[in-house]
């Protein structure tokens, strides 16, 4: 394998990169949608607040999530269930029309606005309402991102650190670029959805195995995936 990585480490790196790309882009789209109904000057402020909040939240959650997942099978199962919910949300978002996503991309790029300062004729909202909507979404999506990365790379510390660092970097520096990339190439988002689904199922399986005293057989869902702890 390149750079001295074995198959399982390479798979972990690939998974965390795809998870970070998809969830950073998804978070950016939500921020753009929340800001789309604001006048131009307030919209830029709301987007900046949203991206900063998402970056800070990812750092905070990264400091505690890996320790929580190490506590036992029950938390792994809870994390897996949360990621299944994330998959459902992503599926619904990918299945809707492109109009809202187009509005979000326009807002993030600060382009193609109507004369009244709104996007696609959307009704105006206050800065306070938009910021609260963004922060609530950021809390949920930042936890989703960190949890998915921790679940994908929990057996590979280097991949874990890389994935958490990349998630912070993407939200802090390249969120708008990533959102535009996912808008243009939808297959990336669908691939990311499949990977997050895999991570969710793996976390549920490993959590159940720990609770049952490591009695479940090892089932590597992806070739090169790390073995279930305690199973030989």
Image (spheres, rainbow, N blue to C red):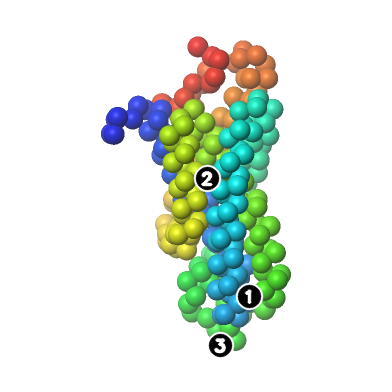
Task: Please determine whether, in this image, residue 181 is positioned above or below residue 230.
Answer: below
- Is the residue marked by circle 2 packed among few (<14), some (14-19), or many (20+) residues within 10 Å? many
Horizontal arrangement in the rendering, residue 228 relative to residue 82 (left or right): left
CA–CA distance in space, label 3 to label 2: 37 Å
Lower position in the chain sequence, tag 1 or tag 2: 1
Residue at 46% from the left image edge and 25% from the top image edge: 226
The label shown at residue 116 is none
Which of the 4 image quadrants contains residue 99?
bottom right
Q: Where is residue 20 in the image (x, y as percent from the top left)?
A: 48, 47
- Please, what secondary structure does the residue beneath circle 2 have? helix
Residue with the most extreme bottom position: 115
Q: Position of residue 43 (x, y in %)?
A: 58, 74
Q: Would you name the residue on which mark 2 appears?
A: 193
Q: What element carries label 3?
A: loop
Q: What element carries label 1?
A: loop
Which mark is on residue 37?
Answer: 1
Q: Tell me the mark number nearer the camera, choosing from 1 and 2.
A: 1
In which quadrant of the rendered image does the N terminus lie? top left
- Determine which residue is flagged by label 3: 115
Residue at the (54%, 65%) spot, across then down: 101
Neighbour tally class for label 1: few under 14, some 14-19, many 20 plus, Cα within 10 Å: many
Q: Which of marks 3 and 2 is nearer the N terminus?
A: 3
Q: Toward the viewer: 21 or 65?
A: 65
Q: Is residue 51 visible?
A: yes
Judged by depth in the image, the label closer to the viewer, 3 or 2, is: 3
Q: Could you tell whether 3 is left or right of 149 in the image?
A: left
The foreground one among 172 and 140 is 172
The answer to whether mark 3 and mark 2 are in CB contact below 8 A is no
Q: Distance between the residues labelled 3 and 1?
A: 13 Å
Question: Percent x, y for residue 218?
Answer: 52, 18
Residue 229 position in % (x across, y down): 54, 19
């Amino acid at each position: 394998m390149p750079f001295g990585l074995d198959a399982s480490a390479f798979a972990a790196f690939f998974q965390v990169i795809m998870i970070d790309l998809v969830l950073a882009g998804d978070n950016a789209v939500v921020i753009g949608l929340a800001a789309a109904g604001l006048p131009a000057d307030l919209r830029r402020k709301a987007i900046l607040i949203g991206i900063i909040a998402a970056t800070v939240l990812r750092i905070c959650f990264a400091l505690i999530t890996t320790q929580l997942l190490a506590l036992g099978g029950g938390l792994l199962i809870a994390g897996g269930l949360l990621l299944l919910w994330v998959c459902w949300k992503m599926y619904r978002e990918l299945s809707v029309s492109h109009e809202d996503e187009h509005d979000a991309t326009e807002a993030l790029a600060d382009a193609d606005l109507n004369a009244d300062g709104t996007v696609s004729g959307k009704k105006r909202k206050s800065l306070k309402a938009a910021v609260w909507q963004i922060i609530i979404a950021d809390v949920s999506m930042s936890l989703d991102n960190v949890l998915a990365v921790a679940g994908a790379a929990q057996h590979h510390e280097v991949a874990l650190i890389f994935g958490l660092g990349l998630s912070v970097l993407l939200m802090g520096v390249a969120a708008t670029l990533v959102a535009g990339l996912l808008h243009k190439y939808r297959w990336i988002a669908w691939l990311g959805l499949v990977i997050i689904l895999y991570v969710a199922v793996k976390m549920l399986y490993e959590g159940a195995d720990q609770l049952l005293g490591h009695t479940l057989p090892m089932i590597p869902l992806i070739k090169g995936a790390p073995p279930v702890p305690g199973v030989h």
